[in-house]
Image: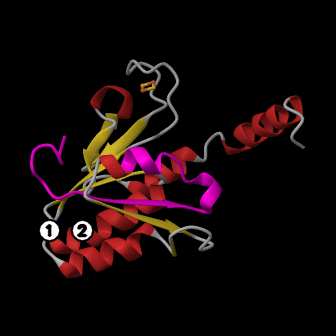
Amino acid sequence: AFKEAGNKVYMIMGARNKDLIFWQDKMKTACDELFITTDDGSLGEKGFVTGVLERLMNQEPINYAIAVGPMPMMRAVANMTKDKGIKTEASMNPIMVDGSGMCGACRCEIEGKPKFACIDGPEFDGHKVNYDLAMKRMNIYKEEEKEKWEQMKKSLGRD
Ligand code: FES
């Protein structure tokens, strides 16, 4: 929609390695220029999405940024864009249970106030998110998630 509205759209996709990058063809059609980064350099540039973002921000004026992905990445992007006064949207991805604002599992803190990602978001002003709290809350079920993941791998025969 941004592109169709006449904006120049850059997309930066990042992952740990090439096996985790997908839909490049679809992403290419949604933007003017697609950048890919991998932590291990197996595809695109070696490094993080923030490296490309830094380059683009120094290259030309950027008006709007949208960050979708791991919390540390969104926090890093928001910190970078805040310094430049670039409005930034973060797509919060907390654990959700009922998705109706009743259970409280997806509670985030936005500008010091509690919000529920399922009914108030999941998109929020990236400069107002309490990422430290969000990351802490994401780890609440870490052990259970790990245990389930191991069970699932076993049941699929992928030990
Ligand atoms: Fe339960 Fe949002 S998922 S309140």
Residues rendered magenta in the picture: 1-27
Residue shown at 84% from the left, 33% from the top = 151
Mark 2 and mark 1: span between their CA atoms?
Answer: 6 Å
The residue pinned by badge 2 equals 81
- Ligand 1, seen in the image, is in the quarter at top left
For mark 2, give the secondary structure.
Answer: helix
Compared across the picture, whether 92 is left or right of 43 comes to: left
**Contact flag, marks 2 and 1 (Cβ < 8 Å):** yes
For mark 1, give the secondary structure.
Answer: loop
Image coordinates for residue 32, horizontal then vertical, percent:
25, 58
Compared across the picture, whether 159 is left or right of 110 comes to: right
Which of the image's four quarters has the N terminus?
Answer: top left
In this rendering, the answer to whether 57 lies above or below 21 is below
Label 1 residue near ligand 1, CB within 8 Å: no
Residue shown at 46% from the left, 54% from the top = 71
The residue pinned by badge 1 equals 85
Q: Is residue 25 magenta?
A: yes
Question: What kind of residue is marked 2?
Answer: Thr
Compared across the picture, whether 75 is left or right of 142 comes to: left
Question: What kind of residue is marked 1?
Answer: Gly
